[in-house]
Image (cartoon, helix red, strand yellow):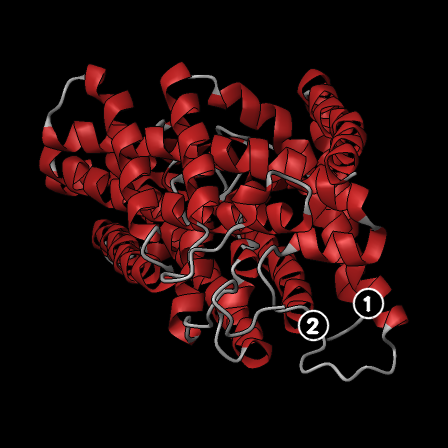
Amino acid sequence: MTDNSSSSYLRRLGTWDAAAIVIGGVIGGGIFRSASSVAESTSSGAQLLTLWVIGGLLTLAGVLCYAELGARRPHAGGIYIYLREAFGQLPAFLFGWCMALINYPGSVAAVATTFADYFCAAVGLPLQWVKPVAAGAIMFIVGVNFFGIRAGARMQNLFTLLKLAAIAVLVVTGLVLARGHLGVVLEPDPTHPVAPWAFLGALLPVLFTYGGFHYLNDLAGEVKEPQRTLPRALGLGLAGVVVCYVLVNLAYLAGLGHAGLAASQAPAADLMRRLFGESGAKLIAVGIACSTFGYCSIAIAGGARVLQTMGADGMFFRAVGRIEPHTRAPQVALAVLGGWAIVLVLSGSFNQLLNYTTVGEWLFHAFGIATLFWYRRRFANEPSPYRVPLYPLLPLVFVVTVLGVIIATTLDSPGDAGISLLLVLMGAPVYFVWRAWRGRRAA
């Protein structure tokens, strides 16, 4: 439970802070690059935009489920808490093992490196500076979060506004290049013929680009009036993301055309270059750097709360479970996650780690949503301040869709998927060894 004792979190995040976390956790660097791969698998602008809308609606179904889960258990830890209560400590430990110790720091390392790439390109630094800049960015974010959630939220709000400004610049640029001929963006592209409904295979990268909406639940222990704020912030934040993604893709189509978008390796830079030249490409590089930096801030803050909760449960080192009494920040957990992410940056091994944990991440999303069925049955008479609409349809749709994504990923990359599942299962013997060691220490 979160209370006002010096060993607990304080609820300091309002609705805008929470919504900014949702927006910042979803919009990282993906939308500035992944639209090209989606365009390659579609045959028209209409199909492309339809995919982004479908992906947004499916993600919204998951977000609404997370809203009820967060309202029922508004504590730090998110999915870890839900799995522990519904299925026991072993599944919860496997989540923490896979996500907090591998996926979260791997994501931070990857996105921090992306930030450093764009930052160095924008200011003219040589490639040798990429790793030091990425490591420095992680240390800076950890240092700010040492002062508590309010300091982290102020930084996050600033970078959320900057990334929304970058998106607005892209959209306006696309509209200017279209010169009032927006109708052509929906026309078929003869260079990319796709069989009817085959384009749905491109839903996989779309859903991955919508990932990250769960970070607010990791921070639920620090949200004011969580039963009211969490559902509102999750809904508003994800709705804003869907609007941004659709408008950005519309801008890409208007400025580059469907064939041009499919052929582009950096659509945001190519779009800006068409109107403003190289100065425009550098400007959007700054915007992408801000977007990726903001994502790193959220991933570090959210991941540290999961580690801290594991430590407090005795599922990780007890020191990691400590909350600093003056700032109410999990400083040891922040240092551990940030330090491990820096090691991954300097070693350059994070890309393979992320490939190996993608299937596990989405599998835990499916299990996390599935806990909602347990909560509804176990606490049937317990009043809930928020209930997901169209229950049980929406959670079923989300779980089935995620399992479909996992199957598609396994068929497409059986090696990576197999290693991902193996990494998750390797956590089981670690769990039993850890419990035995803790039991001997207690005795």
The quadrant in which the C terminus is found is top right
Q: Residue at x 75, y 24 (%)?
A: 426
Q: CA distance from mark 1 to mark 2?
A: 9 Å
Callout 1: few (<14), some (14-19), or many (20+) C-alpha neighbours within 10 Å? some
The quadrant in which the N terminus is found is bottom right
Q: Nearer the viewer, residue 244 or 434?
A: 434
Callout 2: few (<14), some (14-19), or many (20+) C-alpha neighbours within 10 Å? many
Label of residue 397 in the image: none
Where in the figure is residue 234, as x and y percent of width and height? 53, 67
Secondary-structure class at tag 1? helix
Which is nearer the N-term, disc 1 or disc 2? Answer: 2
Q: Nearer the viewer, residue 315 or 76?
A: 315
Residue at image mark 1: 375
Amino acid beneath label 1: Tyr
Is 128 situated left or right of 249 in this image?
Answer: left
The answer to whether residue 258 shows anywhere in this view is no
Above or below: residue 15 compared with residue 338: below
The answer to whether residue 102 shows anywhere in this view is yes
Where in the figure is residue 136, as x and y percent of width and height? 25, 32
Within the image, what quadrant is residue 278 found in?
top left
Q: Residue at x 18, y 36 (%)?
A: 281
Secondary-structure class at tag 2? helix
Q: Residue at x 51, y 62 (%)?
A: 7
Amino acid beneath label 2: Arg
Where in the figure is residue 262, as x and y percent of width and height? 43, 31
Q: Residue at x 46, y 36 (%)?
A: 336
Residue at image mark 2: 72
Where in the figure is residue 172, as x and y percent of width and height? 23, 56
